[in-house]
Image (cartoon, rainbow, N blue to C red):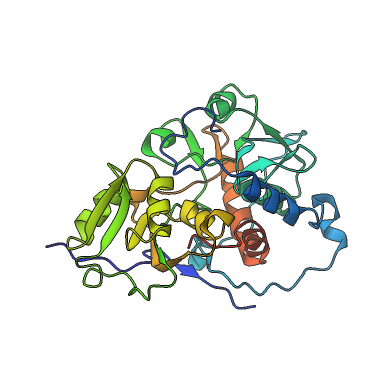
Amino acid sequence: MSQSPPPRSERSTTPSPSSRGDRTGIPFRVATAALAAALLGALLGATPVGAAAATEPRAVTPAVTVPDFWNPRSRGERIEAPQTGRAVRFLTDDEFPPLHFAGPDGNPTGFVVELARAVCEKLTIPCTVQARRFDTLLDALDGKQGDVVAAAIPLTASLRSKFLATRPYFRWPARFAARADKGLPVPSAAALADRSVGVIAGSAHAAYLKAFFPKAVPRDFTDLAAAEGALKRGEIDYVFADGLNLALFVGGQDAENCCALTGGDYLENRYFGEGIGLITRQEDAALSRALDDALQRVWDDGKYTELYLRFFPVSPF
């Protein structure tokens, strides 16, 4: 019998201070107007990228868990971006909040986009960000219509056979959610015995539940919204699904404070993928290395945490 692995299979820490086309297997929810409005409102007080150097850094005391994907032992000498004499062109999509979406002025924003802009600041290079249809991003990169893709495209062996990518800066954790008023135990193989758990039929989460929580009673649903509705009505004990979507649900108006994430995050690559990184063409290896180094430094100086807290009021980790 398989034993349930502990959550947080990679380091996940709390620092102290369109639906357009097929999204190649990404856990995806069409964001509600309320979510988009909340995110846009949070941006209204944000410091413009060009003004960052003229302001004092703000102390950040996170109330949510911020994931750490960087190995401190991998730090090396600072890597400079290659000088091309022109701006580095980032390509993204504007229909997938909170990762990338259209801001109040119509320009792209979101966690991934602002992280890309922070990377450009670290490298002291000019950058532009252009929104395109999600399903055209890699073709546009391959056709040299841009230099870097900053969007929620999963890192896979197939992608790596054609492009380069940085280490992941975001991943898709699997999480449990439960009614907040039932006093249910923290999920474990023993605690879930004979408990009903909603999953999307045929999903990686359903397979993972069967493999590592064999005594749980799975309840199959055709989509996540149906499972969340059943949880809200008390018809099932838990839902096990993509942590980003569950975080949006429990923190959203539709949930009416019914439910909360419980237990830890699950990040096994074989089930939930490697995550997402900044993607470049294979001939741009020097740029890819510089982007990787800059992402590490954005984490080190706290900018990653600042951006994460801006766009994830309820952390999926």
Image x and y of residue 89, in percent: 69, 34
Left or right? Give the position of 82 relative to 163: right
Residue located farthest toward the left when viewing the structure as drawn: 1
Image x and y of residue 182, in percent: 38, 73
Viewer-proximal residue among 289 and 163: 163
Image quadrant containing the N terminus: bottom left
Establish if 258 lies above or below 281.
below
Viewer-proximal residue among 74 and 254: 254
Image x and y of residue 97, in percent: 60, 45
Left or right? Give the position of 55 relative to 11: right
Viewer-proximal residue among 158 and 290: 158
Image x and y of residue 17, in percent: 65, 78
Establish if 73 lies above or below 51.
below
How many numbered discs, if any? 0
Viewer-proximal residue among 34 and 162: 34
**Residue shown at 64% from the left, 57% from the top:** 78
Tell me which corner region of the image, top left, top right, bottom left or bottom right, holds residue 96.
Answer: top right
Tell me which corner region of the image, top left, top right, bottom left or bottom right, holds residue 11.
Answer: bottom left
Establish if 298 lies above or below 106.
below
**Residue shown at 44% from the left, 44% from the top:** 27
**Residue shown at 47% from the left, 34% from the top:** 23
